[in-house]
Image: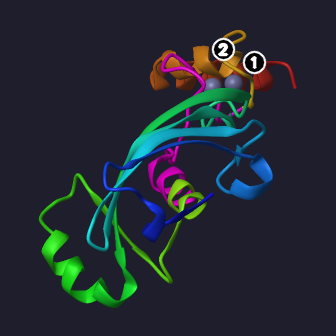
Amino acid sequence: MKIRVDKIPEEGQDIETKFEPSEVNLNFRGYNLREDIAFTGRATRSDDDVYVTGTLKGSITSECSRCLASFAMPVEMAMNVLCVPERDMATREEEMADQPAVDLSFYKEDVIDLLHETRELLIVNLPVKPVCSDECKGLCPQCGADLNVAPCACELDAISSPFEKLKDLKGKLKEKRQNP
Ligand SMILES: [Zn+2]
Ligand SMILES: [Zn+2]
């Protein structure tokens, strides 16, 4: 969706729109968008500055970074972006440097591309390592078993002390010598 800057009324413009997975085209880091992402918000204008605020809501199919299972991750992100004309880029960047709560974006030819802003927000805010649940135990690094399903034998090994293992090994060697 494009917002025409010169069409934003003085009192602001309510925005309610949806983006399809194919337009968002989110293909990175094990994320897969299968449902629409909804945006509800508002654009207000002061001269050529346009402030876009609102909420992105949806669900993104993600791969758990611990157990590799696919899960639906609910997404709810706040958009707080000040869009200024591209020609003002340099001066505005300096000005806004001390306002980390507001993102700064630039528009060309009097048009703000809300899809672009949506993608930016998603890409910056999606976790690098999504987890299906905070309690996810992940996969065993040794045998690859899903530890959410059941503990594996390696886990037990890791718990027993290294000296136990050594004793075990010595025992086995002795056995071998005695029964060649
Ligand atoms: Zn998991
Ligand atoms: Zn294991």
Q: What element carries label 2?
A: loop
Residue 48 in view: yes
* Foreground of the two, 92 or 41: 41
Name the spot of residue 135 as percent of width and height, x first.
51, 16
Q: In which quarter of the image is residue 68?
A: top right
Which range of residues does the magenta coloring cover?
Answer: 119-142
Q: Residue at x 78, y 38 (%)?
A: 34
Residue position marked by numbered label 1 in the rendering: 175
* Foreground of the two, 42 or 150: 42
Relative placement, left or right, of 144 versus 66 is right
Query: Is residue 116 rendered magenta in the image?
Result: no
Asked if 20 appears above or below 100 in the picture, the reply is: above
Q: In which quarter of the image is residue 55?
A: top left
- Which is more foreground, mark 2 or mark 1? 2
Indicate if the residue with disc 2 has its beta carbon within 8 Å of ligand 1: yes
Query: Is residue 135 rendered magenta in the image?
Result: yes
Residue position marked by numbered label 2 in the rendering: 148
The amino acid on which the numbered mark 2 sits, given as a three-letter code, is Asn
Rendered-image quadrant of the C terminus: top right
Indicate if the residue with disc 1 has its beta carbon within 8 Å of ligand 2: no
